[in-house]
Amino acid sequence: MAIEKVKAYFEKYNLADRIQEFEVSSATVELAAAALHCEPQRIAKTLSFMVSGQAILVVTAGDAKIDNAKYKTQFGTRAKMLTAGEVVDLIGHAIGGVCPFAVKEGVVVYLDESLKRFETVFPACGSSNSAIELTIEKLERYSNYSAWVDVCKCWNGK
């Protein structure tokens, strides 16, 4: 299971015990916010795309939506999300539990500017009923992100 890979990943940093597992699903922003009793925008949703034959992840705030024009400017192509099967094969996690931790070799992680307005956010941990609370600094560190990008709209009045 992917959550076991994520737990093993965080074990190296003595953070595995901070992973929260719920009796209910946290597979969507709304469900995760309900399970965590927090604002939906603080859910760090991880979206998976294909860019020039390579799988990438973009971690955004829960209230943000991909802006196709910004995405094309950033990545030189239109936004093409991976299918459910491609997500498992190329990323290593299933939809509902996709996160930027313990992903397959070669997956490039980007963090969207929409996250910077929060002190802490809640990304999933490889299953559809898990999350971990991280500061933005720790999200940067543990996601092994490549760069900050600005590819979203509909957040914080934008």
Image (cartoon, rainbow, N blue to C red):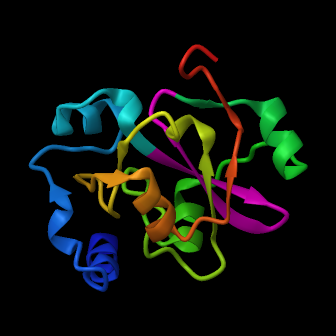
Left/right placement of residue 135 relative to residue 111 reads left
- Labels in figure, total: 0
Residue 144 drawn at (x, y percent): 55, 71
- Vertical comparison of 21 with 54: above or below: above
- 31 sits to left or right of 100: left
Residue lying at 53% horizontally and 19% vertically, measured from the top left: 156
| Figure quadrant of residue 137 | bottom left
Magenta stretch bounds: 45-63
- Kindly identify the residue that appears in the image at 22 percent across and 44 percent down: 25
Dominant SS type (magenta): strand
In the image, is 115 to the left or to the right of 110? Answer: left
Q: Is residue 80 left or right of residue 3?
A: right
Pick out the residue farthest to the top. Answer: 157
Front residue of 37/56: it is 37
Identity of the residue drawn at 87% across and 48% down: 77
Which quarter of the picture shows residue 31? top left
Q: Is residue 76 above or below residue 28?
A: below
Magenta span contains residue 40: no
Q: Position of residue 143 (x, y in %)?
A: 49, 66
**On-image quarter of the N terminus:** bottom left
Looking at the rendering, which quadrant does residue 89 occupy? bottom right
